[in-house]
Image (cartoon, rainbow, N blue to C red):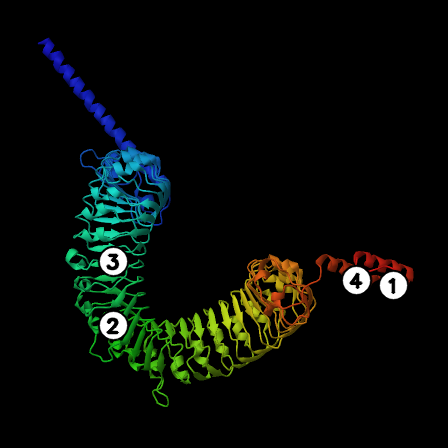
Amino acid sequence: MAKAYFLLLFIILITFSSILNIAFTTKLNFTTDQSSLLAIKDHITFDPDHILAKNWSTTTTTTTTTTTSFCNWVGVTCGARHLRVTALNLSNMDLNGTLPPHIGNLSFLSSIDFSFNNFYGHLPQELSQLKRLKIINFGKNNFYGHLPKEIGNCRKLKYLFLGDNQLSGTIPSTVFNLSSLEYLELRYNHFSGSLPNDMCKNISNIQFLKFTSNKLQGRLPSSIGKCTNLQEISFAENNFVGGIPTSLGSLTKLKNIYVYNNILTGLISPIFNISSLELISIGNNNFSDNLPIDICDKLRMLRYLYIYKNGLTVPIPTDIWNCSFVELDLSNNYLTGRVPREIGNIDDLMYLDLGSNSLYGEIPHAIFNSTKLQFLHMYDNKFSGSLPSDFDFWLPNLQEMLLWGNKLSGGFPSFISNSSNLITLDLNDNFFSGFIPSTLGHLRHLEVLALDYNKFTTQSGSIDQWGFLTSLANCKRLTSLSISFNPLNGILPAYAFGNLSSSLEKLTFSDCQLRGKIPVEIGNFTNMIGFDLSENELIGSLPITVERLQRLQLLHFYDNKLHGSIPHALCNLQNLFELAISENELSGPIPSCIANLTSLRHLVLGSNKFSTLSSSLWGLNDILVIDLSSNAFKGFLPGKIQNLRTLIYLDLSSNKFSGDIPTTLGDLQTLQYLFLNNNKLQGVIPESLGSLVSLLYLDLSNNSLSGVIPQSLVKLIYLTNFNVSFNKLKGRIPIEGPFRNFSAQSFMGNNGLCGSTRLQVPPCKNSSLHEHKSKTIVVLEFVLPTIANGELFHTMNCSMQRMDLRMTCY
């Protein structure tokens, strides 16, 4: 009886001890999880909505006990049995901070999601302590450094999302030992090195592999066929070389493949053996294979095909139009032949790009009845013939049509006015003719209209001569209108011009045979960035309303008949980058306020009647191009020209500049083109011009320059065009460096020059003899006027004779 009593007491004590131990351990685990979460909170430096600051607190009032309060914190999930943290989700909170090593103490954690935040720093190695972890999502952050190789210890990991960070280094081989892995996303990082050839040996469960936009190189893994469960694979935007592994053709579950933007070569045929494929994107490589003629029989599920920028040749297979494509891009290849009429059979087609090939013939009219088509790109081919001109064709969902760079002719395709959702229409560089219809005003969503380089006209003499321009006033979203190089032939109507959309950013009417004055209504275009009315017959002065165009960066009014002076209002355009008003009849001074245009990089004022040059011009320290040629400027070239340290092009030719060439020109190290010809410059060519190390063109012709051609110019190794003709130069023409390639035309009209017979100048005398005589003559020039001593003269004369052994001293 006593033994039974003591045995029962012993069992009770043991049980009570175990309960106390469990309670203590549970309390300890609670404390560990809580302190780990608080450590994570302490490492967050920015919490814009104060979510964690308000919620992650031990004083949070809940209906549970204090020991379990953290289970109610935002983003925290606890298990029902052990009340331990099993999931942590802080995604999409705009949090900043680092990830502390304490996260490794959350030993029951199976899922962690910190995506779409701004976490930075290194990924802690302590993540490897989380043996239950199945999901890691740190996508869309700023983590950097290496991916810890210890991540391979997380044997239960199924999903690893690290995309859109700044991670670098090689991808640890341990990642490819995670046999449970189903989803691996490492895209948009800076990983480098190559992928292991046996990558798929231990990850046969993988379904998604995403390596897009890294710095990976080498060949694609030949073992890729062992990843038999793959549904999507992306090797895009890396530096992979070689061909498509043949084993890839055995991936019977693969739906999407992305290998665009690499340096891959060879055949693409392995891809076309995968009947499950829905999307193929292999653009911008060097594949030279052709599409199989039975592509639609093999790939009945295919909806998206992108093979742009490769080496595809021969005609497009007729069978391709029997596919159920939604998007098809074969642009920038070498495809030839005609486009099959069957193109109209693709009922679901939304995107078609056949641009930049060598396709010819008519564009099948059936394509213009594809009711789902949104993007039609047939640009830069050899298509000819006309487009449908009646309204029976309908593209109700069309948003963008690019047909530029073909040989299309006929009238404007009127059916386009039915495409009420059209945003961009580009018919540039064709042979369209006739009138531009006023029905364009129906296109209320139109943003870009490009009709340059055609033969469109206006209805001269008609009341509705500019009807199309008037109708475009209804296109309130229009940002770009370019109709240059069409014989519109008329006076630009101020009423229609002024009513165009105030959203316009680009307006070009170059070489349209326009007459009349520039409408003052141009001041309405307050969003204008580029404005081109060049090569017309416009008269009058520059409207002062131009000062309202505060966003203007490019202004081209050159080659017209404009007169008057440059208005000071022009100096208020603080964003002006390029001003080209050459080949007009403008006169007066260049306003000194031009120096206020600190954004100005190109100033082209040539072929006008300007007479006074403000010194402030040389204060445009960042300017790249200055053309003041063919005006009436006179006086000395300014020494301050040295301030233009970024100048590339300087043309002061055909003016009346006089005096010496400033030696400070040699400070313009970036100068590539220098034209000072046809002036009245005198003196010598400065030695400092030999410091213009970037110079390509140098023209000093038709001046009154004297002296020799500086030997320093032989250092100008990039100089390809050189002209010093019709000056008063003398001495030997250099023979080294770029002078080996110049012809006689570069030196003609200088009677004192000598050198090679191929330059059509007299041969030079013995060089050493010539140098000695020159030195003696220099001495005589300085000595003879001041010395009348005949004996000294006799001595110097004998000295000359000793230098020349052919002379005799008496």
Of mark 2 and mark 4, the one earlier in the sequence is 2
Which residue in the structure is indicated by mark 1? 786
Q: Position of residue 404 (x, y in %)?
A: 33, 71
Marks 2 and 1 sit apart, C-alpha to C-alpha, by 92 Å
Secondary structure at badge 1 equals loop
Of mark 1 and mark 4, the one earlier in the sequence is 4
| Residue 479 visible to the viewer | yes
Which residue in the structure is indicated by mark 3? 290
Give the left or right position of residue 229, taking residue 472 as reference.
left
Marks 4 and 3 sit apart, C-alpha to C-alpha, by 79 Å
Q: Looking at the picture, which amino acid does disc 4 mark? A: Ile
Closer to the observer: label 2 or label 4? 4
Of mark 4 and mark 3, the one earlier in the sequence is 3
Q: Around disc 3, counting alpha carbons within 10 Å, would you say few (fewer than 14), some (14 to 19), or many (20 or more)?
A: some
- The extreme left residue here reads 1
Marks 1 and 3 sit apart, C-alpha to C-alpha, by 91 Å
Which residue in the structure is indicated by mark 4? 777
Q: How many marks?
A: 4
- In the displayed structure, 595 sits above or below 128; it is below
Quadrant (top left/top right/bottom left/bottom right) for the N terminus? top left
Q: Are marks 1 and 4 in contact (CB under 8 Å)?
A: no
Q: Looking at the picture, which amino acid does disc 3 mark? A: Asn
Closer to the observer: label 1 or label 4? 4
Secondary structure at badge 2 equals loop
Secondary structure at badge 3 equals loop
Of mark 2 and mark 1, the one earlier in the sequence is 2
Q: Looking at the picture, which amino acid does disc 2 mark? A: Ile
Secondary structure at badge 4 equals helix
